[in-house]
Each structure stands twice: as C-alpha cells, then as structure tokens.
Image: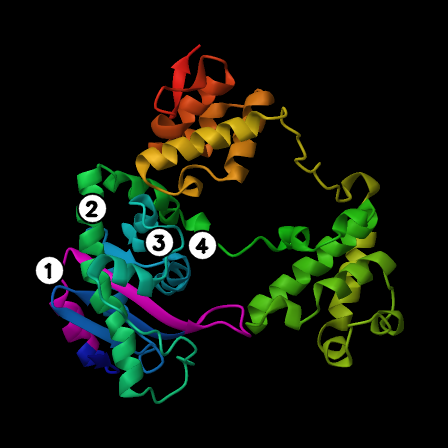
C-alpha cells in the first residue's frame, strides 16, 4: 500500500493499534543537506505493510503517535540513521527499539551485515537491491520503487522473528537490549555542540591558543549557518580554509577574501560575520584562551594488549561470534589504560551489561594476575587460576 492521503494514513495506523511489534524503515537522501531529506517511511505490523509519503503528507500525527507508543517494539535494520530522522519528526526518542543488524552480530552472523545478506541468512531468499541509488525525494515514484521499499519491511518481520527465536535459544535476547539502550537517551540524537566542532578539523594541534580560539569561534559560526541553511558545513567554508583563517587571523574583508578557498559568494553571505567572530576571539582574555586536552597517547605495557586479544579470540570462538563484537582493539587498549592508570574499571564498557561476566571480569583477572592462560592437552588455550 502506498499512502498519500490523511484518511488512508489514519486507517492504516488504526489497523496497527493491536500490533505489539512494528517493522520500520526509511528512504532518504543526504548528499547536500545538513538534515536528511526524508522520501518514504515504510511501516508494517501483523498483515499490514505500507510505504507512507511524507512529501505528500507533511502532517503525519497518527503515524508519529504510533511510533511513540512505548508498548510497541520498533524493529529496524541498521537503525541509527532511521532513528535520527524519526526522533526529529517525533520530537522525542521512541523506545523500545530492536536492531536486526546488531542482533545478527550477537548470534554470530557477522558484523555490519547488509539487509540482503541477513534476509538470505535468515530466510534463504535472495533480494535484489536494484533501487539503492534512487532519489527517493523525486516524484512520481514508480510502482517498482514502491514495492521495493515495502519489501524491506515485509522481509524485516520474519527476519526479526527468526533472530528473536535464535537469541532466546542462545540466552542472548537481553544482549540486544544492552546494545541499543543508548538510543533511549535524547542526548544521543542532539545536534552537535557548535563550540566543539573545531575539534574535528585536522592539524589543529599546530595552532597556538589564540589561533585555536579563532578556529573555535569561526567553526561554531559555520556549524550554526549549516543548520540554518540546511546544507553541509563544508559547502560554506571548507576545513582547510577555516584552518588558514585561524592561522592568519585576517582583520578586514580584503585580507579575508585573499585566503584560498574564501570565495566571493561566501564573502557576500558570511564575510562580515566571520570577521566579527575573529574580533570576538581577539577580545578573549589570555587566561580564557582555548587549550587542547592532552591526547590519550598512553602506551600500555608491552605484550599486555596482545595477551588480552588472544583471550578475546578464544572467547569469540567459544561463543561463535566475531571478536570485535566482544571487544575490538580500541576497547582492549582503553581497558588496559583504565587498569594501568587506576581508573574506575566499573565505568568501562567491558564492565557494562552482558560483557561484564563474559569478557570484562576474566580480562580484569588476567591483568591483576589472578588468572593466566595455558594450553591444555588438546591444544586449546584456556584460563587457569594463578
């Protein structure tokens, strides 16, 4: 069903009131805009599936109220960007959420598995992603495009059921909940802090505190403009140009326009504002200038991370999931750093949720010398008490 009228939307949403599980997907374009340009929202529950046209329906209250319902599980595949769109439309987070890509990793089907691959793995069906590069905001949509979009949620429901059954048998259903809990926090979907965006710019550590303060001010201005104009920040002024402005600190339009990448079009739009931000930065007192935090370059004791990585490999084989799902090298490094710098290990991600018992406590025991590794008579590496 392709829904373009308020009456049809209300009727469809009424039919989903009794559904305990909703499968959801979105189609969007985000090539030149700050925010996603939403083209379709596909929703299903029970025997009802539809593609809803948000361009034809700027007011979608029945659908949004349905998504907000905390009694309904919302199922996605690779949920993050879909949630960014829907949280913005709903004006709030929409728990509870289930992500089939995360669930697939936890049953051993691989990380970052595509939707086509998960459908084949779970259902033995091959689907063709023939509309991957469709401009979903262009109208009219063809019947083939609409069916393609609806198929994403038609297949998502049986995939979800297969995964829930497998997770339940493996005793890992709660693991999924632990992985998506952050999506219940509104802060997860808040816009980036404009005052911190300068930290994303490469080579900024070569700047002195005054120049860094200039960079912070003009990067924050650019971020605000990108939101107002709904365009990519780099389409206003590129990072390299911002960095050069911060190095040279121009104080007039002639000097500013002479900096490479500072084109006349943007000079007309934002030149005065950039110079004003530079002026503001120059008025900051010496004691309040930006200073970068020291980079976390802690070098852990030689061989320790390799030992833990070997243990993670052993556990991943026992659990039949990829090592990176348990603990990738970045997590291992930060775990050892926490231990060696006497930081609170309970706050580390490997001591949160299902990972604590399975990997966190044994790794801590290895680090503290309470346990070691040995090779048993069968050639298997295992933990031993020290």
Residue lying at 37% horizontally and 32% vertically, measured from the top left = 315
Q: Locate residue 273, reporting x and y percent.
A: 74, 68
Compared across the picture, whether 210 is left or right of 153 comes to right
Q: Answer yes or no: do the residues labelled 2 and 1 have beta carbons within 8 Å?
A: no
Residue lying at 45% horizontally and 12% vertically, measured from the top left = 370
Instruction: Answer with mark 3 or mark 2, whichever residue precedes in sequence.
Output: 3
Instruction: Answer with mark 4 or mark 3, whichever residue precedes in sequence.
Output: 3
Residue of label 1: 18
Residue of label 2: 166
Tag 1, which secondary structure? loop
Occupied quadrant, residue 76: bottom left
Residue of label 4: 189
Q: Answer yes or no: do the residues labelled 1 and 3 have beta carbons within 8 Å?
A: no
Distance from the alpha carbon under mark 2 to that under mark 4: 30 Å
Instruction: Answer with mark 2 or mark 1, whichever residue precedes in sequence.
Output: 1
Residue 365, above or below 227:
above
Of the 4 image quadrants, the one containing the N terminus is bottom left
Closest to the observer: 106 or 233?
A: 106
Q: Locate residue 289, reporting x and y percent.
A: 78, 44
Residue lying at 81% horizontally and 45% vertically, measured from the top left = 209
Q: Answer yes or no: do the residues labelled 1 and 4 have beta carbons within 8 Å?
A: no
Occupied quadrant, residue 85: bottom left
Distance from the alpha carbon under mark 2 to that under mark 1: 25 Å
Distance from the alpha carbon under mark 4 to that under mark 3: 8 Å
Residue of label 3: 93
Read off the magenta span: 9-37
């Amino acid at each position: 069903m392709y829904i373009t009228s308020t009456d049809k939307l209300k009727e469809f949403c009424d039919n989903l009131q009794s559904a305990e599980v909703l499968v959801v997907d979105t189609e969007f374009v985000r090539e030149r805009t700050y925010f996603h340009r939403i083209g379709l929202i596909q929703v299903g529950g029970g025997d009802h599936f539809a593609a809803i046209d948000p361009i034809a329906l700027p007011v979608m209250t029945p659908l949004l109220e349905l998504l907000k319902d905390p009694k309904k599980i919302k199922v996605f595949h690779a949920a993050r960007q879909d949630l960014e769109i829907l949280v913005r439309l709903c004006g709030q987070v929409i728990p509870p959420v289930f992500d089939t890509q995360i669930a697939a990793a936890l049953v051993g089907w691989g990380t970052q598995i595509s939707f086509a691959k998960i459908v084949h793995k779970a259902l033995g069906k091959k689907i063709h992603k023939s509309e991957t590069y469709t401009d979903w905001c262009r109208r009219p949509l063809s019947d083939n495009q609409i069916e393609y979009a609806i198929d994403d949620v038609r297949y998502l429901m049986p995939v979800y059921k297969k995964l829930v059954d497998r997770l339940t048998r493996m005793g890992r259903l709660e693991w999924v909940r632990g992985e998506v809990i952050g999506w219940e926090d509104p802060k997860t979907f808040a816009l980036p802090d404009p005052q911190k965006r300068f930290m994303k710019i490469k080579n900024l550590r070569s700047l002195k505190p005054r120049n860094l303060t200039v960079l912070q001010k003009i990067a924050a201005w650019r971020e605000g403009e990108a939101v107002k104009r709904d365009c990519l920040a780099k389409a206003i002024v590129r990072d390299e140009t911002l960095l050069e402005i911060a190095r040279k600190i121009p104080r007039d339009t002639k000097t500013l326009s002479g900096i490479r990448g500072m084109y006349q079009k943007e000079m007309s739009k934002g030149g005065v504002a950039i110079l004003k931000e530079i002026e503001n930065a120059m008025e900051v007192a010496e004691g309040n200038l930006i200073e970068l935090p020291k980079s976390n370059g802690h070098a852990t004791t030689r061989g320790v991370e390799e030992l833990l990585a070997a243990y993670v490999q052993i556990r991943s084989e026992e659990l039949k999931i990829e090592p990176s799902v348990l603990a990738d090298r970045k997590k291992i490094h930060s775990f050892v750093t926490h231990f060696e710098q006497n930081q609170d290990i309970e706050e580390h991600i490997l001591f949160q949720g299902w990972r604590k018992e399975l990997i966190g406590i044994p790794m801590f025991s290895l680090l503290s010398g309470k346990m070691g590794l040995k090779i048993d008579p069968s050639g298997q590496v295992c933990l031993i008490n020290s």
